[in-house]
Amino acid sequence: MAPGARARRHAPPRDQVLSAAMAMIAEGGLDRLTMAALGREVGMSSGHLLYYFKTKDELLLQTLEWSEGRLGEERRTLLDSPQPARARLDAYVELYVPVAPRDPHWTLWLEVWNRSQYADAEAESRGRQAAIEKAWHRDLVALLAEGISRGELRAVDPERFAARLRALLDGFSLHVAVGLPGTARDQVIAHVREFVDSALGV
C-alpha cells in the first residue's frame, strides 16, 4: 500500500481535526496551535497533517470555514424562524458579535485575514474568505428586504444599509475581541440596537 493511501486510511475524520484545532485556539490561543501539537491531539504526525493541509495557512483557513459552516447553520435557523424581522435582526447581531475577548472564532478570523493581506487579490484563499463575508451580507440583505416589504422595518436600501450595519458590527466586534475597555459585549449590542431602532423603527 502506498504511503499516501496508508495516511488516508488511518487519518481521523476531517471534522475531528478541525474541531480539535478550534478547541486548541479556544484553550490557548493561536500560539498553542502548531502542526505538532495538533497532531498529538488527534493522533496524527505533523507530516500527515501537512499531507492533508499543505501549510498552516491552509489549516487555519479550513478551520475558519468549518467554524463558519456551523455559524451559518445557526444563522439560517434564526432567519427562517417565524419571529418578526426586528427580533431576527437582533438575533443576527447577537450571533455576529464575539462572545467575549479572545473569542476563538474571531481570533481565527483576524489571523486568517492578517496572513492573507499581502496575497494576490485573485488568490483562491482570498476568494474563499470573501465568500464567508458574502454569506453574512447576503443573509442580512434578505432579512432587511423581507422586513421592509412587510412594513416591519422603515424603507431603506437593503444593500447599502447592510454594508453600513456590518461595518458598524465589524468595528465593535474587533473592540470586543481584543478586550478594549468600555466595549463589553452587552454594551456593544445595546449600541447596535439603539442604532437600528433609530434607523429602521416604524
Image (cartoon, rainbow, N blue to C red):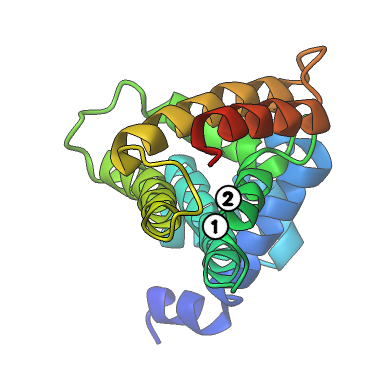
- Label 1 secondary element: helix
Q: Position of residue 180 (x, y in %)?
A: 76, 14
Q: Position of residue 48 (x, y in %)?
A: 52, 62
Residue at point 77% right, 45% down?
Answer: 26
Measure the alpha-carbon separation of dots 1 and 2.
Answer: 6 Å
Note whether residue 111 is visible: no
- Tell me the kind of residue under disc 2: Leu
Residue at point 78% right, 20% down?
Answer: 179
Q: Position of residue 164 (x, y in %)?
A: 42, 27
Name the residue that disc number 2 marks.
89
CB atoms of marks 1 and 2 within 8 Å: yes
Quarter where residue 198 is shown: top right
- In the image: residue 136, left or right of residue 100: left
Quarter where residue 159 is shown: top left
- Label 2 secondary element: helix
Note whether residue 55 is visible: yes
Name the residue that disc number 1 marks.
85
- Of residues 170 and 158, the one nearer the viewer is 158
- Of residues 37 and 105, the one nearer the viewer is 105
Residue at point 56% right, 61% down?
Answer: 75
Q: Position of residue 156 (x, y in %)?
A: 35, 37
